[in-house]
Image: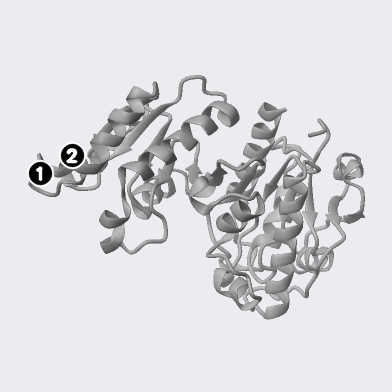
């Protein structure tokens, strides 16, 4: 990619906090040293959001991404694209269509190398589905756009204190044991290790593998998944030369001393991975899609319709997502 390629920030649902987070991030561009970014569509939304929130921000319509770095100094660059009215807390079909179009535009720019990365704003999955969006979420859409199967990518939640990867995501807790497999753990661990080397600059990444059951199964007293599924995966990964450890009882895996012993923790289910990151780094947690040929990050929170337009949204996670995307792009260059 060109050294001057900007980041592409998608709008998210216009009725959520996405527009005000984009505005707030731009206001902090100098103090936070954020790489130049362009918002994909939504110039009307952003202008109305700025007026609603009393922010003196000028937007600049751009058609050539090469113009973004220069315009970024004094105005928020916005690509021509889908738009909608600004209706904080009141999502509608028009806004969902604009969110989808913005996501599609940003993804193409990153996939084709015209943008250094795509940073996705928070969307409503239900609203996207109402537009005919055929994917469970943005991650699956991005994998498809890259020509990859959903299981060829992995979701990492990265904060200043901790990085975690859920091996099963939107799966009922009762279904997790039957969803887990040695093959799943091995394939995801390979994706994570490669991404930590390429995008995070870790030459020998250390992976900690969490147990599924209390006390790591207590020698089979509380379940046999550790011995039957997880331990064989660890043995296979060690044979491949990866630095892995476990299965670790999850109740001790996220203590400060334990966190110092690994670079990422692979967790067996959604909450096992997300609860510790949100407890430690809620306003700085970043969702990173690993395994894509292009870079995608996102703030690790939702649309927050209930507080949209009230000036209460903390831009910390969006700023962290933009900064991490910029750092990852610099390493890939």
Colour setting: one colour
Identity of the residue drawn at 17% across and 46% down:
214
Question: Residue 266 falls in which quadrant of the image?
Answer: top left
Q: Earlier in the sequence, mark 1 or mark 2?
A: 1
Whether the residues at callouts 1 and 2 have beta carbons within 8 Å, the answer is: yes
Question: Residue 144 falls in which quadrant of the image?
Answer: bottom right
Question: Residue 303 falls in which quadrant of the image?
Answer: bottom right
Q: Mark 1 points at which residue?
A: 220
Across and down, in percent, residue 243 comes to: 37, 23
Q: Distance between the residues labelled 1 and 2?
A: 8 Å
Identity of the residue drawn at 36% across and 42% down:
183
Q: Mark 2 points at which residue?
A: 227
Identity of the residue drawn at 40% across and 24% down:
242
Circle 2: element type:
helix
Q: Can residue 254 be seen in this view?
A: no
Across and down, in percent, residue 7 comes to: 75, 44
Front-most of 76 and 298?
Answer: 298
Across and down, in percent, residue 65 comes to: 87, 45
328 vs 83, left or right, is left
The quadrant of the image that shows the N terminus is top right
């Amino acid at each position: 990619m060109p050294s001057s390629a900007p980041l592409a920030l998608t709008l998210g649902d216009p009725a959520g906090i996405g527009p005000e987070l984009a505005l707030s991030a731009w206001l902090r561009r100098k103090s936070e040293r954020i790489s130049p970014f362009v918002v994909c569509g939504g110039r009307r939304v952003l202008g109305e959001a700025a007026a609603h929130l009393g922010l003196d921000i000028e937007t600049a319509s751009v058609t050539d991404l090469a113009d973004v770095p220069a315009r970024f100094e004094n105005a928020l660059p916005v690509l021509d694209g889908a738009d909608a009215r600004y209706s904080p807390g009141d999502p509608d079909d028009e806004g969902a269509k604009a969110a989808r179009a913005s996501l599609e535009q940003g993804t193409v720019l990153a996939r084709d190398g015209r943008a250094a990365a795509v940073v996705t704003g928070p969307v409503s999955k239900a609203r996207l589905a109402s537009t005919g969006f055929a994917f469970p979420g943005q991650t699956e859409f991005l994998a498809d756009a890259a020509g990859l199967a959903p299981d060829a990518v992995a979701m990492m939640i990265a904060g200043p204190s901790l990085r975690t990867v859920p091996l099963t995501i939107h799966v009922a807790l009762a279904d997790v044991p039957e969803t887990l497999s040695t093959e799943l753990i091995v394939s995801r661990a390979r994706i994570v290790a490669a991404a930590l080397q390429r995008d995070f600059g870790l030459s020998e990444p250390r992976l900690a593998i969490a147990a599924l059951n209390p006390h790591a199964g207590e020698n089979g007293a509380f379940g046999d998944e550790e011995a039957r599924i997880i331990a064989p995966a660890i043995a296979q990964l060690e044979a491949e030369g990866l630095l892995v450890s476990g299965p670790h009882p999850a109740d001790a895996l996220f203590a400060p001393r334990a966190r110092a012993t690994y670079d990422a923790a692979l967790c067996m289910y959604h909450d096992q991975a997300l609860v510790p990151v949100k407890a430690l780094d809620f306003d700085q947690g970043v969702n990173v899609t690993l395994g894509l040929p292009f870079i995608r990050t996102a703030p690790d929170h939702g649309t927050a319709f209930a507080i949209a337009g009230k000036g209460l949204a903390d831009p910390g996670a969006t700023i962290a997502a933009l900064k991490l995307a910029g750092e990852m792009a610099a390493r890939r260059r």
